[in-house]
Every structure is written in C-alpha cells, then in structure tokens.
Amino acid sequence: MQDTSTDAFFTDHAVVFGLLMFVLILVFYTSGSKNKYIQGFYSVIPPLLLCYFLPGLLNSFGLIDGENSPLPSIGSRFLLPSCLILYTLNLDLPSLWKLRKRAGLFFLLGTLGIVIGGPLAIWLTAMISPELIAGQGDDAIWRGFGSLAGSWIGGSANQVALKEILQPSPELFSTTIAVDVFVAYLWMALLLFGAAKTDKINKWLKADDSDVKELTKTMEAYQQENSRLPEARDLILMVAVAFFGTGLATLISKPVAGYIAINFPMLERFSLDSDFFWLILFSTLFGVALSFTKARKLEYAGASKMATLLLYVLIVTIGMQMNILAILQKPGLFIIGFIWIFFHAALLIIMAKITRTPFFYVAMGSMSNVGGVASASVTATAFHPSLISVAVILSVFSYTIGTYAAWVCAMLMKFVVEL
C-alpha cells in the first residue's frame, strides 16, 4: 500500500516495516558482539533505548512518516494486548503469596514509591521552577509522566497503554522516554553495583539473608524440572492464544466504553470512556484467568520470550512517531525524573534498614516495578541466576497492576498540576 499524503522518502508501509525490522536486526546482532568497543557502547546505551530512538531518527530526518503511518496503531491495538496476555498467563499467585512477607512487601512498597513519588516530584519542581510543568492539552506534563509511570510500574507495554489512554503529544512522549531510560538505567546500574557488594550492604542493614539462600536452592530445582525447548505446536498456541484474547478483549471493550460514554459522561475525565483502557483491562484479566489453567505451562516453552518479541516489534513502531530533536527542548524534565526515582529508592532503603531486610529484596522490589521483566531478570542474575524466577513472578504481577496503578499516579499528577 502506498501513502501519497506524506513527503517522507519511504512511503510504502511494507518497506517502512522492513526498515523497522532492520533496526531490530542491527540492534540485537550488534548487542551480542564480542567486540570490546561495541560491548562498551552497549554498557552505556541499552538496546531498549536504541529500539526507541533509531526509528525516531528515521522519522526526525524525514525518511519515514511516523505520524501518518498505520503501523503504530496496529502495534498498540494488536501487539500490546497480546504481549500483556503472554506476560500474565504465567502469573504464579501461590508462589507470590509465599514471598509476601518480604518480596511482596518491597514490591508493593516500590509501587507505592512510584505512585506517590510522581506527584511529589512534580509538586516540588513546581515550587522551584513552575515553567517546567507548564503545558496545556496534549502537552500537559501529567500526560507524559503518566505514561512514564506505566513504564515504572510494569514496563514498556504498560507505558504504551498509558500513552494511548492519556494521549500525550509525540514531543512530550519522546522526552519522557529519554527521562525513563536514562534515569531508570542509572538506578539499575547502582543496584547492579550494590549486588556485587551484597554482603557489605546486608551487614549495614543488619539483615539475615538465609531465606534468600534457601530460595536460591528451591528455584534451581524448579527450573531444572520444568523448562523445555519449544516445539512448533507451542509457538502456534502462544500466538493463537494471545491474538484470540486480544480479539475477545476488543469485542467486549468497545460496547463497554460506548455505554460509559453515553450513560456516565462524567467519567470521561478519568479516561473510562476510552475503549483502549478497557481493551488493556480485559486482555490483562484474560491473561490472569489463563494462569489458572493448563495454558500457563506455555511459559515453560517460552511464552514470556514470545511476549518480549512482540513487545520489541511494538517498541520500534512506537519509536517511529518520535521527533528526537524535541527532547532537547525540555532538558529540565530530567529533574522530575531524578526526584521521582530518589523518593522511590529512599522509601525502599529506609524500610529495609528498619526491618533488617536483605538487599536482594530491595533490588527486586524496585526493578520488578521500574525495569520490568528484562531489567529485573538481569538484576536478579547479578545475585544468582536461579533467582530469575523471583524477578519474573514479581514483574509479571507488576505488568498485571501496572496500567491501573500508573493511571492512579497520572490522576494524582493531574490533580497536583491543576492546583
């Protein structure tokens, strides 16, 4: 199909999609390189950031037209709910319940730190530099940072969900992604550094980590017992279940949103008349429902890896809407991000000191929120590879509540801005 309404160099949607896939080839092929210079580059610039910004560069320099392309809409309507279903179908509520006293507590505390920290950061910034939070309509600061809250309570899928619900301008969204990646990965780097100093930190916290060591042995046995190589049947079932759930959620969401828009128009200010809001809600609930069935065994064959594949395709389609040059227009917004993550981190560390909780739970409680499955898994590996399952369990739960907790955070930020 040819799009004649744009001045972009590449207008054929198939060609544009091919370019986006080439971006994924370039990023993931080079990120696996053994070259020390390339490894050094990726130690500073994460692959996730490039998957957002390389398509943004193509758009910024007029090679493609992200604003008028149907690809971002296809990604958000088909790929986003599908990957949420695959991420949540392996939700292990019994295992999460067993971790409730420490891992669960610090996960919820991390979530609370993000929900409260966002409005607090905007309030403090407004006192120092009120022009930073100025903006009306789709440039309203709470819209952009509301989508950031989705990333920091869940992951990129939740961030895109909040983007579609809150509708920030492409320029504002581009800036908040830069804040997201830079601040979150800086915090992750500090946690990885702390993982190498676990014994010293636990000594300072006066924490007993015997339960972590016992958990390590348990998880090692669990992984060896259940993991297997995927067959073609597994891959077909993963994709079919994901897109069937997306279709079912779409079928239900439109009449629900229409009913609310007609009968409860006052709920529009909370975005409850958005069919996309209900699409994400119902697809997530569908994934949670599957976690109580045999479908959850698809995770043993790599359902979350398939979800990650869909997610990265989604990310490059979202990235093609960015205007990279717009990021330079509001560098002060990074201040909000630093205040926000500082409050989140301080809340966790203070509680760990008071309760004498091992540093591992602090790291998991934080990164299962801020980093999602990928970053939380990397952080868990820094403690011990067998602990990845803990990261996945908490991160999956984060995906489950991320969209809704972030929505609450966005509404609180909106309230602070409108004071």
Image (spheres, rainbow, N blue to C red):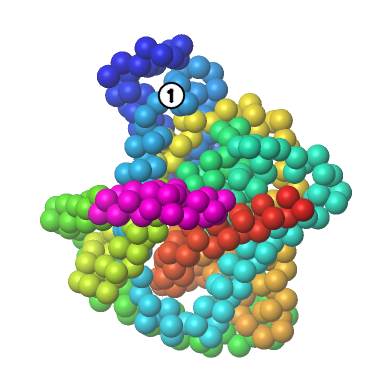
- Look at the numbered disc 1 and give the secondary structure of its residue: loop
For residue 82, above or below residue 138: below
For residue 303, above or below residue 385: above
Residue appearing at x 67%, y 44% in the figure: 141
Residue appearing at x 35%, y 64% in the figure: 285
Residue 210 showing in the rendered view: yes
Q: Nearer the viewer, residue 23 or 15?
A: 15
Q: Amino acid at mark 1?
A: Asn
Residue appearing at x 34%, y 49% in the figure: 254
Farthest residue to the front: give it: 263
Residue appearing at x 58%, y 61% in the figure: 408
Magenta span of residues:
248-275
For residue 273, above or below residue 193: above
Asked if residue 369 lies left or right of residue 3, the reply is right
Q: Quadrant of the N terminus?
A: top left
Please identify the dominant SS of the magenta region. helix
Farthest residue to the right: give it: 128
List the residue tagged with mark 1: 68
Asked if residue 277 lies left or right of residue 18, the reply is right
Q: Is residue 15 magenta?
A: no
Coordinates of residue 263 in the picture (x, y in percent):
43, 54
